[in-house]
Image (tube, grey):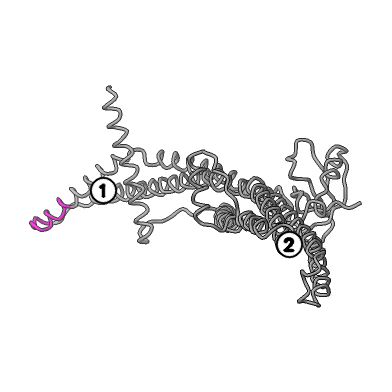
């Protein structure tokens, strides 16, 4: 057999499979065919994966807008990324403003109060620009890249397996339909063979002959899908196997959430560092400007307003630091490492509600206290948790180990 013959036969087989799936899908939409429903657990996992993909995309895109408000710059960076080339370094708005102030101060004269103040403001703006550049770089590595890897990597694999599962389900239902029609044709043939026409009426004989031709056509159609029962068993087996593969992939979404939570902590810490640097830079600048006698002559209430502003910012910073989920307040890495090495058990307080993704995990309620310990070979992001007679895996990022 030549390669061309093989390709033609393969093409014909693929076309037949595609047509069969299209017919089955159309009949299901029209309500003319039955549809095999997925089990509730798998449907829930699919919904969770789709929800994760939807919001991960939105958060990722809006974070990019936050870090780089200029749409043209974002498009340029996207093009360079797709071309696998490094984008050229560009000065940001703070650095441009800072340079303008420095140039103006030098033009007016560094020895004058205004010129000296402009130079100092410009230097501070450039420092803020450098801090902003560090924030963008840190956030891109520790937050945006993991989110993008999920969308372009893990979820694409999930979508591929989900599509295969859909096709296997269509093949299964098409095989069920063919088997049903084949059995109906066989039953009708038996009925016609057992019933002979009565009388010599021409219309009766014609009707009988037409029925025989119809039955023969049904038999020919049934023979084209030979061994319908065997085909049904094969398609059922392939569908069950694909459903299991898809389920195993989807159960990894819980680990993805735990990983993205750590990335979110890194992003928050990067923002805290950036805003703390900016505040310190501006505080130092304010002190430097206050040393000029004529700087704030027109505003006698400046010092009191500044004190109130500093107190407000300090209070806000303290409250924000206490509320943000940083690694120092949630998961103490050395303590967790010690726990894993000692193979002992510890009490831990639950920080957030957690819904178990499967029977191997333990659902958690915020502020409850459970017993946790490590098992040899367990993933580093998980511990075993116990609550009474209940036992299961729990994510480390949801726990605070107690002394």
Q: Position of residue 236 (x, y in %)?
A: 47, 43
Structural distance between the alpha carbons of marks 1 and 2: 109 Å
Dot 1 corresponds to which residue?
Answer: 189
Dot 2 corresponds to which residue?
Answer: 112
In primary-sequence order, the first of circles 1 and 2 is: 2
Q: Residue lying farthest right? A: 403
Question: Label 1's element?
Answer: helix
Where is 194 relative to 114, above or below? above
Q: Is residue 202 magenta?
A: yes
Q: Residue lying farthest top? A: 1
Q: Nearer the viewer, residue 181 or 106?
A: 106
- Please identify, in this view, whether the residue under mark 1 or under mark 2 is nearer the observer: 2
Q: Residue at x 22, y 52 (%)?
A: 195
Q: Position of residue 28 (x, y in %)?
A: 38, 57
Q: Is residue 178 magenta?
A: no
Q: Nearer the viewer, residue 330 or 244?
A: 330
Whether residue 43 appears in this view of the structure is no
Q: Position of residue 203 (x, y in %)?
A: 10, 58
Q: Nearer the viewer, residue 224 or 345?
A: 345
Q: Is residue 379 left or right of residue 103?
A: right
Whether residue 134 appears in this view of the structure is yes
Q: Report the number of numbered marks.
A: 2
Circle 2 crowding by C-alpha within 10 Å: few under 14, some 14–19, many from 20: few
Q: Quadrant of residue 367?
A: bottom right
**Residue range of the region highlighted in magenta in the rendering:** 199-210
Q: Is residue 229 left or right of residue 60?
A: left
Q: Is residue 37 left or right of residue 329?
A: left
Q: Residue at x 88, y 48 (%)?
A: 346
């Amino acid at each position: 057999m030549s390669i061309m013959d093989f390709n033609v036969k393969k093409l014909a087989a693929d076309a037949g499979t595609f047509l069969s799936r299209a017919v089955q899908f159309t009949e299901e939409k029209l309500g003319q065919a039955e549809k095999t429903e997925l089990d509730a657990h798998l449907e829930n996992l699919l919904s969770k994966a789709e929800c994760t993909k939807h919001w991960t995309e939105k958060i990722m895109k809006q974070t990019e807008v936050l870090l780089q408000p200029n749409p043209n710059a974002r498009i340029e960076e996207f093009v360079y990324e797709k071309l696998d080339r490094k984008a050229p370094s560009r000065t940001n708005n703070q650095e441009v403003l800072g340079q303008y102030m420095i140039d103006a101060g030098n033009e007016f004269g560094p020895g004058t109060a205004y010129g000296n103040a402009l130079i100092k403001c410009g230097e501070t703006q450039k420092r803020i620009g450098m801090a902003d550049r560090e924030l963008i770089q840190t956030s891109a590595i520790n937050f945006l890249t993991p989110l993008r890897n999920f969308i372009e990597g893990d979820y694409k694999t999930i979508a591929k397996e989900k599509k295969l599962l859909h096709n296997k389900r269509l093949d299964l239902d098409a095989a069920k339909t063919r088997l049903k029609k084949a059995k109906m044709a066989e039953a009708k043939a038996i009925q016609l063979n057992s019933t002979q026409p009565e009388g010599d009426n021409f219309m009766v004989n014609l009707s009988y002959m037409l029925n025989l031709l119809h039955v023969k056509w049904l038999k020919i159609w049934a023979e084209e899908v030979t061994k319908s029962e065997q085909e049904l068993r094969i398609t059922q087996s392939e569908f069950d196997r694909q459903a299991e593969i898809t389920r195993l992939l989807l159960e990894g979404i819980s680990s993805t959430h735990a990983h993205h939570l750590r990335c979110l902590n890194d992003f928050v810490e990067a923002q805290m560092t950036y805003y703390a640097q900016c505040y310190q830079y501006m505080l130092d600048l304010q002190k430097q400007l206050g040393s000029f006698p004529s700087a704030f002559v027109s505003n006698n209430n400046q010092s009191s307003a500044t004190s109130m502003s500093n107190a407000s910012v300090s209070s806000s910073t303290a409250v924000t630091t206490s509320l943000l989920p940083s690694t120092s307040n949630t998961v103490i890495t050395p303590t967790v490492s010690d726990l894993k090495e000692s193979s002992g058990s510890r009490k831990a307080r639950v920080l957030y509600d957690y819904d178990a993704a499967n029977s191997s995990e333990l659902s958690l309620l915020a502020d409850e206290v459970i017993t946790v310990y490590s098992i040899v070979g367990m993933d580093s992001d998980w511990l075993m948790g116990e609550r009474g007679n209940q036992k299961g895996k729990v994510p480390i990022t949801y726990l605070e180990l107690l002394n």
